[in-house]
Image (tube, rainbow, N blue to C red):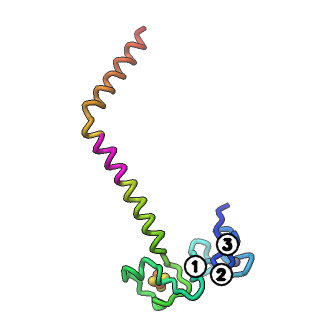
Amino acid sequence: MDTGTCSRCHQPVNSQAVTCPHCGTQLKAYGHPGIPLHRAIGKESLCDSCTYHSDDTCNFPQRPFAKECILYQNIEESKIELQQQRDAKSLGATVNHWMKRNQSLLLLVALLLVCLMIAVSTT
Ligand code: SF4
Ligand SMILES: [Zn+2]
């Protein structure tokens, strides 16, 4: 079972729960477990820390004072995600680059392995 935390009382709750069993806060929109309802903590609006507010792509009427939102995406979290994607890509690129530069070496090693296998199988 996946667990999350309630955005109001911070108790652990089942991530599929539509309402918090501890404080009764609505956690999902339209009573659907697949639609998380994000909720502002304290006086701050969700939009202040939302990606769609900072890149001006949100056209919800409650912007910029949304206290609850189903589309909210935290700027910091998405930055971290982007960075992770970039890191993964650059690691892939480094490996690719290295393989290209050392193609002949890899070929030699592969040939040696084949020779070794033949030698082992014929003894
Ligand atoms: S998606 Fe929601 S939280 Fe984000 S800017 Fe729009 S209304 Fe605000
Ligand atoms: Zn709660």
Q: Which residue is disc 3 drawn over?
A: 17
Residue 99 point in image, percent of width and height: 30, 39
Earlier residue among tags 3 and 2: 3
- 54 sits left or right of 7 in the view: left
Residue 58 point in image, percent of width and height: 41, 83
Q: CA distance from mark 1 to mark 2?
A: 8 Å
Q: Which residue is disc 1 drawn over?
A: 37
**Mark 2 and mark 1 in contact (Cβ < 8 Å)?**
yes
Amino acid type, mark 3? Ala
Amino acid type, mark 1? Leu
Tell me the crowding category of disc 1: few under 14, some 14 to 19, or many 20 or more residues within 10 angstroms, Cα based.
many
Residue furthest out toward the top: 123
Q: Secondary structure at mark 3?
A: loop
Q: Which residue is disc 2 drawn over?
A: 26
The residue located at (25%, 31%) in the rendering is 104
Span highlighted in magenta in the image: 90-98
